[in-house]
Amino acid sequence: DQQVKQNSPSLSVQEGRISILNCDYTNSMFDYFLWYKKYPAEGPTFLISISSIKDKNEDGRFTVFLNKSAKHLSLHIVPSQPGDSAVYFCAASGGSQGNLIFGKGTKLSVKP
Amino acid sequence: KAGVTQTPRYLIKTRGQQVTLSCSPISGHRSVSWYQQTPGQGLQFLFEYFSETQRNKGNFPGRFSGRQFSNSRSEMNVSTLELGDSALYLCASSSLQGAFGNTIYFGEGSWLTVV
């Protein structure tokens, strides 16, 4: 039973436009959420996180939004750049989960 | 500050053999976690060590084991390798135990191929 779901395996966006990556979770006890970016043959790189006491966190071109009532979070990248092309993983922790629970990832392709 | 370092980066083993992977966490980090990434299952938690003690364990068979040394370096071992153990093994470190409100940083991984 997947507790963290990324329902879009892939997303293609034009350079300069907004990329929106979505993530849903089922465990209402999750209280900390992170996004990681992963290039092939490399480990995941931490991008941005958000605590459940907030509904938005920004860091440069990256913004994460959290909707607790819908158990949904999204990562916005504005403007998108070709170097952003990678697999993006959503992860969550909290409740009885002492470790990160990951979604299966969304592959973002940013076309020049 | 150096990141999480994993060795070896790539290795090929034969079914039935055993393998040991090594991880050096970020300086000052006392927690080391291990994750397995496969195309079908994504990233799955193996175990976490903090102050040389296993604090949390994922749903993997006993063939998967680990340990942590007093300098926080960690090793994981997989015995009696099976073809399905072929995966990217990722080590991650953090300053605090557990993932609660805690940012976890990953190494580049060790690619294991079992033939």
Image (cartoon, rainbow, N blue to C red):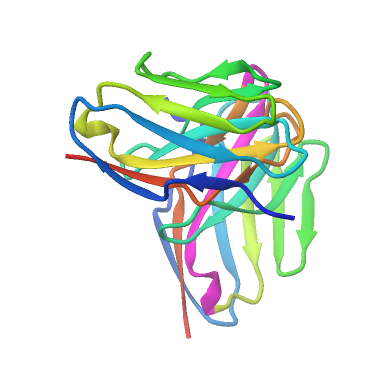
Which SS type dominates the magenta stretch?
strand
Give percent across and percent down for residue A110.
Answer: 48, 75
Q: Residue at x 45, y 54 (%)?
A: A106
Give percent across and percent down for residue A65.
Answer: 71, 51
Looking at this rendering, what residue extends furthest in the bottom direction?
Answer: A112
Give percent across and percent down for residue B100.
Answer: 72, 29
Give percent across and percent down for residue B89.
Answer: 43, 40
Q: Residue at x 64, y 62 (%)?
A: A76
Residue B49 vs residue A87: left or right? Answer: right
Question: Within the image, what quadrant is residue A61 found in?
Answer: bottom right
Looking at this rendering, what residue extends furthest in the front direction?
Answer: B70
Q: Which residue is nearer to you in this view: B3 or B7?
A: B7
Q: Residue at x 25, y 21 (%)?
A: B80
| Quadrant assignment for the C terminus of chain B | top left
Residue A80 vs residue B19: left or right? Answer: right
| Quadrant assignment for the N terminus of chain B | bottom right
Magenta stretch containing residue B105, yes or no?
no
Q: Residue at x 20, y 25 (%)?
A: B16
Is residue A86 placed above or below B106 in the rendered structure?
A: below
Q: Which residue is nearer to you in this view: B13 or A95?
A: B13
Q: Which residue is nearer to you in this view: B46 or B73?
A: B73
Q: How many marks?
A: 0
Residue A53 vs residue A81: left or right? Answer: right
In this rendering, does residue B54 appear at all? yes
In this rendering, does residue A70 appear at all? no
Is residue A8 placed above or below A112 in the rendered structure?
A: above
Q: Which residues are magenta?
A: A82-97
Is residue B111 placed above or below B68 in the rendered structure?
A: below
